[in-house]
Amino acid sequence: VQLVESGGGLVQPGGSLRLSCAASGFTFSVYAMSWYRQAPGKDRELVAAISSDGGSIVPADSMKGRFTISRDNAKKTAYLQMNSLKPEDTAVYYCNTGLRIGAPLYWGQGTQVTVSS
């Protein structure tokens, strides 16, 4: 199993980024996919998750309306679209997969997102 995140980088406040998580080594279409993030000195937190049938959640009020998760089963890739980025969104973003949301089995290596002017 391999999960490879990409798309991170430096962006100004108010900007947008789209992260990608390319998956291999398992039957992508039957697994849930999630994005977490971890800022320095803070616990890892759930950003967004999407089930195998496409149902999605963005639990935190601070990210609702700004972040959207999606998946392309044909490309075996999950995405995180992030708009109206704020400095407090700065973190390492990780994708993971499991048979259901909230039960991750495998993690990617993470991609750094820095929001700064």
Image (cartoon, rainbow, N blue to C red):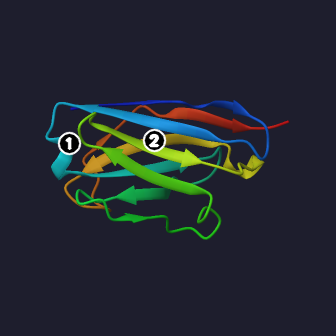
11 shown above or below 101: above
Q: At label 1, which amino acid type do we have? A: Phe
> Mark 1 sits on what residue?
28
**Residue pointed to by mark 2:** 94
Q: Nearer the viewer, residue 76 or 116?
A: 76
* First reached walking from the N terminus: tag 1 or tag 2: 1
Front-lying residue, 43 or 102: 102
Q: Outermost residue toward the right?
A: 117
Task: Single out the mark in the foreground, 1 or 2.
Answer: 1
**Secondary structure beneath label 2:** strand
Instruction: Please report the residue visible at 44 percent of the width from the left and 49 percent of the height from the top.
Output: 35
- On the image, the x and y values in percent for residue 34 come to 38, 52
Classify 10 Å Cα crowding around label 1: few (below 14), some (14-19), many (20 and above).
many
Q: Is residue 105 left or right of residue 6?
A: left
- In depth, the one of 30 and 46 nearer the eye is 30
The residue sitting at 49% across, 64% down in the picture is 58
62 left or right of 103? right
Q: Residue at x 16, y 51 (%)?
A: 30
Q: For the point 67% across and 49% down, which residue is it?
A: 89
**SS at badge 1:** helix
Amino acid type of the residue tagged 2 in the rendering? Tyr
Q: Position of residue 103 (x, y in %)?
A: 27, 59
Q: CA distance from mark 1 to mark 2?
A: 17 Å
